[in-house]
Image (cartoon, grey):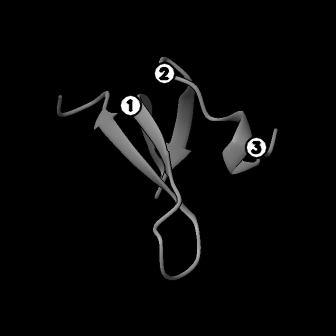
C-alpha cells in the first residue's frame, strides 16, 4: 500500500479513508498569520457520492 504526504495531495487522487474509497476534490494549503500551517482537503466518498 502506498503512503502519501500532504504535500503530494492533488485533485483527482484516489485514497482509502476508513476502508472506503474516496477521491480528493480540492486541496488548499493554509498558512494563517497566527498558528501552525495546515492542509484543508475536500474529499468525496466514491461509494455514496
Q: How crowded is mark 1: few (under 14 residues within 10 Å), some or many (20 or more)?
A: some
Question: Looking at the image, which residue is at 38% across and 31% down?
Answer: 26
Contact check, label 3 and label 2, Cβ < 8 Å: no
Residue 9: give x, y in percent of width and height: 62, 35
Quadrant occupied by the C terminus: top left
Between 36 and 6, the one lying in front of the other is: 36
Say which element carries label 1.
strand
Work out which residue is located at the far right of the displayed protein and give it.
Answer: 2
- Label 2, label 1: how far apart the Cα atoms are: 5 Å
Q: Residue 26 carries which label?
A: 1
Question: Where residue 14 sits: x, y (%)?
Answer: 54, 26
Contact, CB < 8 Å: mark 2 with mark 1? yes
Q: Position of residue 25 (x, y in %)?
A: 36, 27
The earlier-in-sequence mark between 2 and 1 is 2
What's the distance in space between the residues labelled 3 and 2, CA to CA?
Answer: 13 Å
Query: Is residue 21 shown above or below 37?
Result: above
Please give the label number shown on residue 4. Answer: 3
Q: In x, y percent, where is residue 1?
A: 81, 40
Q: What label does residue 11 carry, if any?
A: 2
31 versus 22 height, above or below? below
Amino acid at each position: 500500500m502506498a503512503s502519501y504526504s500532504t504535500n503530494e495531495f492533488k485533485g483527482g487522487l484516489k485514497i482509502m479513508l476508513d476502508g472506503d474509497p474516496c477521491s480528493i476534490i480540492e486541496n488548499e494549503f493554509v498558512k494563517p498569520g497566527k498558528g501552525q500551517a495546515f492542509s484543508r482537503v475536500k474529499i468525496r466518498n466514491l461509494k455514496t457520492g
